[in-house]
Amino acid sequence: MCGIVGYVGDNQAAPFLLEGLSKLEYRGYDSAGIAVFDGKGIRVEKSVGRLAALRDKIKDNMPVGTIGIGHTRWATHGRPSDRNAHPHTDCSGDFVIVHNGIIENYLSLKEELIETGHDFKSETDTEVVAHLLEEVYNGDFVSSVREVLRRIEGSYSLVFMSKKHPEELICTKQDNPLVIGIGEGENFIASDIPAIIARTRRTYIMNDGELAVVTKDAIKITNRAGEPVTKKVFEVNWNAEAAEKGGYEHFMLKEIHEQPKAVRDTMSQRIAKDGKSIVMKELKWDADYLNSFRKVHMVACGTAYHAALVGKFYIERLARIPVEVDVASEFRYRQPIVDESTLLIVVSQSGETSDTLAALKESKRLGAKTLALTNVVGSSIAREADQVLYTWAGPEIAVASTKAYTTQIILFFMLALYMAELKGSQTPEAVESLIGKLKEIPAQIGETLSDVEPIKTFAKQYGFNEDVFYIGRSLDYEVALEGALKLKEISYIHAEAYAAGELKHGTLALIVEGVPVIALATQKSVYEKTLSNIKEVKARDAVVIGIAAQGNTDLEKYVDHVIYIPNTDELLIPILAVVPLQLLAYYAAITRGCDVDKPRNLAKSVTVE
Ligand code: M6R
């Protein structure tokens, strides 16, 4: 996730570009840059760090000109640096582009372009687009851009600018957002409405495959076939704050709804074209390397720890390698048995959690090989670990982690399949079938998010209870832990998760009439066992809300309400089952009037021990 902007008009471009980018920093903030045509050439200015660093750099020498583009970056390919900051240019500097998304076939394109003499300056996937445009340019800007689009694969919103066509910008999108703001004697381009709302409320929301040629007086939009498209003007009636949250009331809700796209991005480039195997270009492991490990040891905090528990399940089940999981704050102080034969995996959305970082350093000291699963490119944990897998979820702003969790689980699932392939512990048919199910997950999350009304109703009904219990067995238990944490941290309701079979060893004493129990019953292999635990709490007059896969109507006989989620392989169900629990926590917090995005006493990134 990055933010892009464009301006063409009667006024100076740079002030709008900087103002627009400042409203898009929620989309990324590890570097920023702008490019402005000054009548002779295109001046590109960029800087690593937040937008303030760029502002500082150019404050006494602002680029002058009335057409330009800008970018605020959230690194995916290539660490945050001046070189990797956008805009990117071709060899001559005549073509300049900004990009949000991932060009999946950039490596093969880059090789081809290097062979034909192109000189690359960055490690990004994006730069290939500028060089490709230079390579295919035929004198006609639009048809050359179309040729580029035919050759690139992946997700993008792109703005193209050329010294040879100094009065127009071309923009297009595929699977990433793009809006055009309609002004008078000027027009605007942006990833999102907050960037333009101070200048105009009249917009075109671009659809996938559409391409717009934007000049100061006209916006010409065509479809993939080059036919003109007549679009309705979308009048924005949100205030600036709502616009930043994409029209959602809170970042948390926005991020919950971003999950289909986030998990799709995590998978992107990691599934072979034929859908038969997992590709982990970042790892370059072979069977001997993997077999050199006696065990895997995972360390993380909070939600990332819960994701690691699911990861343990996947690696043990699919790759048959023993896995231990520790809370990072405990790990260092219990003299863990970690040495050269340990693969130490740390999980951290921010990549900055102090306990996780300390555990990573300690493990390296003890000789372990280390792998980080993180969301933030160039973070301390990413830099410290021997190897890194990024979740590519985009920035997570809300303190309560949502899309980080689901993307971490997706990444663990893919890692486990990758290990299983190397070890030969699963048949090729089984791997292919699981990959098939994995590919359905983004749409299935979307389905889960399509009807939130029953969840809102439960939240209103039970939002004022003092205690809520979550129970489940096997993977359902791991999800229950995450569901309870979500409820606790944002609604301040006392919530506890229990392995359903453990209830009778103490906790059952707390179950009295009217206590809400969320019972996860998605795991077919332990369904009958879970049912007997549900009967135990029902017999004490608890109010039970069951979570089940579609088709399991049997559960309705034993509980008060059922929330259904789409059906998939048992192993993948946690990714779907957690979504109603995130929503339940969110709406319970709303019912209680809590500050959802900034819960009391908590910080997004815990950089103290
Ligand atoms: O950035 P990290 O993933 O290392 O953060 C770990 C925890 O602090 C984090 O998951 C925390 O538990 C969240 N607030 C949970 O929603």
Image (cartoon, grey):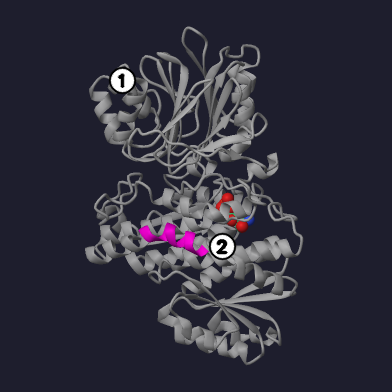
Q: Position of residue 434 (x, y in %)?
A: 32, 64
Q: Position of residue 582 (x, y in %)?
A: 59, 63
Image: 86 above or below 503: above
Toward the top, the furthest residue is 40
- Image quarter for ligand 1 equals bottom right
Q: Main secondary structure of the magenta part?
A: helix
Pointer 1: residues within 10 angstroms few (<14), some, or many (20+)? Answer: some
From the image, state whether disc 1 or disc 2 is nearer to you: 1
Nearer the observer, 52 or 426: 52
Q: Residue at x 58, y 22 (%)?
A: 186
Image: 396 above or below 118: below
Toward the bottom, the furthest residue is 539
**Left or right: where 377 falls relative to 24:** left
Dot 2: what SS? helix
Q: What are the residue bounds of the magenta stretch? A: 439-448
Residue type, numbered disc 2: Arg
Q: Which mark is residue 137?
A: 1
Q: Which residue is mark 2?
A: 334
Residue type, numbered disc 1: Tyr
Residue 159 visible at all: no
Picture mark count: 2
Nearer the observer, 358 or 457: 457
- For residue 590: magenta? no
Is the C-beta of the residue carrying label 2 under 8 Å from the nearest atom of ligand 1? no
Q: Quadrant of residue 22?
A: top right
Tell whether label 2 touches label 1 (CB within 8 Å). Answer: no
**Left or right: where 362 falls relative to 464:** left
Nearer the observer, 373 or 44: 44
